[in-house]
Image: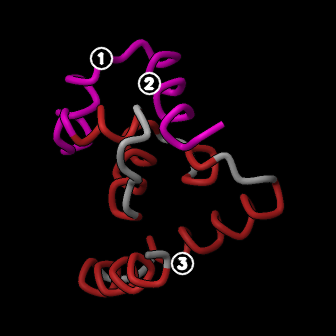
Amino acid sequence: MSIGEILRQVRLKSDKSLSDVSEGAHISKSHLWSIETNKSRPTVDVLQKLSEYYHIPISTLTGENKQKSKTSDKIMFIINNLSKRDQKKVLKMLEIFFE
């Protein structure tokens, strides 16, 4: 299952509209639609916003297996304990790495 399909499934199971998620996660509605329809891929920043909005780990949104899930959760724990400035730096580095 693609990330877009997973995100759509999570949204529908949460009984949320694109507008609800857009407003709550501070992501444009058109960008969310583009991700859900696999026309674009979410950045780490977008995944983090959605993870926080839905209160679920990023690994759930990306469909990673359990081992990767544990690693992702550890990374997110570390990132979440950094200052906002350092978080932005780390997320930018990750975006560049995964391009």
Q: Is residue 1 left or right of residue 54?
A: right
Residue at the spot of label 2 = 11
The image quarter in which residue 48 lies: bottom left
Residue 58: x and y in percent read 55, 53
Residue at 46% from the left image edge and 16% from the top image edge: 12
Residue at 63% from the left image edge and 45% from the top image edge: 60
Question: Mark 2: few, some, or many residues within 10 Å (few <14, many ≥20)?
Answer: some
Q: Verify CB contact (< 8 Å) between mark 1 and mark 3.
A: no
Predominant SS of the magenta segment: helix
In the image, residue 95 above or below residue 25: below
Residue at the spot of label 1 = 17
Residue at 33% from the left image edge and 81% from the top image edge: 92
Residue at the spot of label 3 = 78
Label 2 vs label 3, nearer the camera: 2
The quadrant in which the C terminus is found is: bottom left
Q: Element at badge 3?
A: helix
Q: Verify CB contact (< 8 Å) between mark 2 and mark 1.
A: yes
Mark positioned earlier in the residue sequence (2 or 3): 2
Q: Amino acid at mark 3?
A: Ile
User: Magenta stretch?
Assistant: 1-30
Mark positioned earlier in the residue sequence (1 or 3): 1
Q: Is residue 59 left or right of residue 34?
A: right
In the image, residue 62 above or below residue 19: below
Q: Element at badge 2?
A: helix
Mark positioned earlier in the residue sequence (2 or 1): 2
Q: Amino acid at mark 1?
A: Ser
Residue 81: x and y in percent read 45, 77
What whole-number distance in Å separates the C-alpha atoms at marks 2 and 3?
A: 27 Å
What whole-number distance in Å separates the C-alpha atoms at marks 2 and 1?
A: 7 Å
Specify whether residue 2 is painted magenta.
yes
What whole-number distance in Å separates the C-alpha atoms at marks 1 and 3?
A: 31 Å
Q: Element at badge 1?
A: loop
